[in-house]
Image: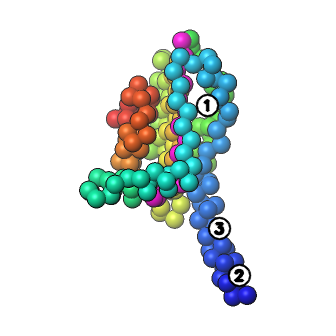
Amino acid sequence: MKPRIATLALSCLLLPLVGACQSAKLRLPDFQPLADKATDSVNISVSPWLLHTMATLIDDKDADGAATREMFSRIHSIEIRSYEFATDFAYSRADIDAVRRQVTGSGWTQLMQVRDRKKSEDVDICMSIENNQVTGFALIASEPRQFTIINIVGSIRMEDVPKIENYLHIPKGTAGLGALL
């Protein structure tokens, strides 16, 4: 009987942590139909299981490998959607704006917002912070022929984002954080 009580107590203690991480997870529309219209597309979804598996495959005998393994151990999920089109606004701006609204709620801190009305280019970079801990990262960048959304759930530092893009082999032309830096 005691193991059940211990399991229940541990579950109750961990539940707030799971909830905190979930608040950093953005609800993304189903962009899959856009893949047929896009000239280039990137659609990456990395689950906790896959992140754990990737971390175990990294050789941690050198400092860079150990740091990368440690970084992946703090991340719960990664979602990347990036589409480029041959024509202007082949995608729904309302879908992108709906994702942007999610990072204006409580718990999110805006690090950067760029609006270029002449070129119709918008960039938002936000962090989800709870109890002085970063629980998530979001980048939402859109322009007439392209948009990119990156959502990382877990404990992350700004300098980790380009490392993640590099490790996942995200194409250099993608409008991710690396393109902005």
User: Which of the two marks, 1 or 3, is nearer to us in this view?
Assistant: 3
- The amino acid sitting under disc 1 is Ile
Q: Circle 3 sits on which residue? A: 15
Q: Magenta segment, which residues?
A: 73-86
Q: Residue at x 54, y 45 (%)?
A: 46
User: Which of the two marks, 2 or 1, is nearer to us in this view?
Assistant: 2
- Specify the farthest residue to the right: 1
Q: Quadrant of the rendered structure where residue 1 is?
A: bottom right
- Count residues near mark 3 (Cα–Cα under 10 Å), then give few for <14, some for 14-19, many for 20+: few
Q: CA distance from mark 2 to mark 1?
A: 45 Å
Mark 1 or 3 closer to N-term? 3
Q: CA distance from mark 2 to mark 3?
A: 16 Å
Q: Circle 1 sits on which residue? A: 96
Q: Circle 2 sits on which residue? A: 4
Mark 2 or 1 closer to N-term? 2
Give the SS element for disc 3: helix
Quarter containing the C terminus: top left
Give the SS element for disc 1: helix
Q: CA distance from mark 1 to mark 3?
A: 30 Å
Left or right: 160 as drawn, with respect to 12: left
- The amino acid sitting under disc 2 is Arg
